Image: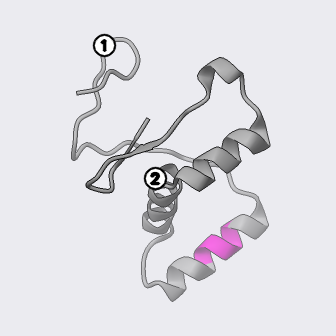
Amino acid sequence: MQKQGVGSTLRKGKTYKVLPTLDADTHHKLKRLALACDMSKTSLAAVIIRHVVNNEAYVQWLQERYRGPKEFRIIPVRHSDGRIEY
């Protein structure tokens, strides 16, 4: 298991709430896309987030776009089974 903060661990199968604040345009688009995909907005947002954090190119783009401190840069590693780790 990997550590997350003080005294907590990440466990497979456990879910975590993330409540992003969306502007009206983004909310409208998410709602329309969720309807088109026959799923809830929350489920679609989870799919989108899961895809982004497991995509090396997008992770790199985000880091370039928002330019956080270099000592915290993430280097994604793709394993032979397709899993991304960082």
What's the magenta bit mostly, secondary-structure-wise? helix
Badge count = 2
The amino acid marked with disc number 2 is: Asn
Q: What residue is at 32 percent from the left and 47 percent from the top?
A: 79
Q: Secondary structure at mark 1?
A: loop
- Report the span colored magenta: 27-31
In this view, 13 is above or below 47: above
Of callouts 1 and 2, the N-terminal one = 1
- Quarter of image, res 14: top left
- Quarter of image, res 39: bottom left
Q: What residue is at 31 percent from the left and 45 percent from the top?
A: 15
Is residue 80 shown left or right of residue 20? left
**Which x, y percent locates residue 25?**
77, 69
Q: Residues within 10 Å of mark 1 (few under 14, many from 20)?
A: few
- Quarter of image, res 27: bottom right
Q: Answer whether residue 45 is magenta in the image.
A: no
Q: What residue is at 29 percent from the left and 26 percent from the top?
A: 2
Q: Nearer the viewer, residue 27 or 4?
A: 4
Distance from Cα at disc 1 to Cα at disc 2: 26 Å
The amino acid marked with disc number 1 is: Gly
Q: Which numbered marker is on residue 7?
A: 1
Q: Which image quarter is the N terminus in?
A: top left
- Tell me if label 1 and label 2 are in contact, CB under 8 Å: no
In this view, 15 is above or below 86: below
Is residue 26 shown left or right of residue 81? right
Q: Which residue is mark 2?
A: 54
